[in-house]
Amino acid sequence: MVTTRNTRGDVVRAAGKLFAEKGYHGTSMRDLGKELGLLGSSLYSHVDSKQDLLVSVVEEGATLFESSARAALEAPGGPELRLQALIAGHVDVVLDNMDVSRTFLNEARMLDHSHRSRVLEARDHYEAAFREIIGEGVAAGAFRSDADPKLEAIFILSILNSLERWYQPTGLLDRGGLVDRLTGFAMHGLT
Amino acid sequence: MVTTRNTRGDVVRAAGKLFAEKGYHGTSMRDLGKELGLLGSSLYSHVDSKQDLLVSVVEEGATLFESSARAALEAPGGPELRLQALIAGHVDVVLDNMDVSRTFLNEARMLDHSHRSRVLEARDHYEAAFREIIGEGVAAGAFRSDADPKLEAIFILSILNSLERWYQPTGLLDRGGLVDRLTGFAMHGLT
DNA sequence: ACTAGACAAACGAACGTTCGTTGGTTTAAT
DNA sequence: ATTAAACCAACGAACGTTCGTTTGTCTAGT
């Protein structure tokens, strides 16, 4: 067996996995070392502290979602198409980075105050992309005139952010079908 | 100041609060004691173990949601009305038991295997109530014929289970308005 | 081609602290 | 007088982290 040495990237990746699975406080540095075939103390060759690891993982999540939103906002098309692009982008980020996404969504509140407020800012900025497109749709008459962009954005993001709790890539529903179902529900609900 | 003695109920209630705030692993028995003006060790007059506390809180959550679903299923009316009843019941449970709900939703996975599988069962049973009513709506022609009850139930529950992450009882949107918005979105989406 | 130096990665022991929990004793209400 | 509730001291284990040392791999200078 060919065993290569570990890099900081490997440690952050493993941290994302364990933080996603067992939570930040439920993961010890020794757990994390074991995941990589190392002692807990060896991780400090790559990392300043445990909190530092959480910052790296969450920060990566924030970046992923922000650049996904930016791409969707710059895409051409009407509000419906752009909303679908936003949803598809979100699905891609979550499914391609499950551990990072889960940690970003569930463990960011374990960050100390300064880092946490930066993340809340990033999250609100991401949410604003949804508000914006929904607002455009209302203004253009494509969506219900009494729709509240702020509230509907929260509803749609609630669904998207819950994907990690139930979606199985190996299941019957593939990625494209999922995006279609999500977009359809966001547009028309049950009727 | 009149200080009365604490009961097991007080301890479980405080545990719900701290577990909701800081997570199960982020809460120590000494934290919990401090919350009640006690030493950590004093809690063992009321409780067998820390895990025992989590079981009590989560179990209470499961009971609350299950009895809410039972009531809504027994209510009269067509699928739309019954779905609204289901949603209103969920909102009541969450807003009247915020700490228990948050712990039930986020910390149940920290339970040991046997207790956790019992909770998953309860959760699936609760979800089945949504599937059932949506299925009725489809059969009765009240909802889209190509709606997938399993998937739509997940979508609606995703929104409901995210309430704890953003809803503020002191905000502009009161409970009745919230239920209306939720039901409207579930029925018609953005259009 | 050979070797000495530099350097990052990992080890292993130990640190001070906190953890969940126990057992024995005191307090206060019934 | 009984009893539940709370205190207090202490336990062993686990925690995050530090430190000095060892390992292996590149890099320069000969």
Image (cartoon, coloured by chain):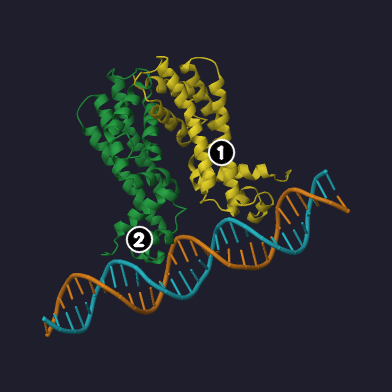
Chain colours: A green, B yellow, C cyan, D orange
Q: Are marks 1 and 2 on the same chain?
A: no
The chain under label 2 reads: A
Answer yes or no: is residue A120 visible. yes
Instruction: Locate residue A154 relative to residue B67 in the image: left or right.
Output: left
Residue C15 screen position, x and y as percent: 50, 72
B48, B136: nearer the viewer:
B136
In three-dimensional space, the C-alpha distance between marks 1 and 2, rounded to whole angstroms, equals: 36 Å
Find numbered disc 2 in the image and state the secondary structure of the residue it sits on: helix
| Amino acid found under the numbered disc labelled 2 | Leu
The chain under label 1 reads: B
Give the residue displayed 63% in from the left and 51% down from the top: B33
Residue A158 screen position, x and y as percent: 40, 33
Can you say whether A159 is above or below A117 in the image? above
Give the residue displayed 65% in from the left and 55% down from the top: B39
Residue A55 screen position, x and y as percent: 37, 52
Q: How many marks?
A: 2
Q: Quadrant of the C terminus of chain A?
A: top left
Give the residue displayed 38% in from the left and 29% down from the top: B151
Q: Quadrant of the N terminus of chain A?
A: bottom left
Q: Which residue is mark 1?
A: B100
| Amino acid found under the numbered disc labelled 1 | Val
Give the residue displayed 60% in from the left and 43% down from the top: B56
Residue B116 screen position, x and y as percent: 51, 44
Can you say whether A169 is above or below A115 in the image? above
- Image mark for residue A36: 2
Camera-nearest label, 1 or 2:
2
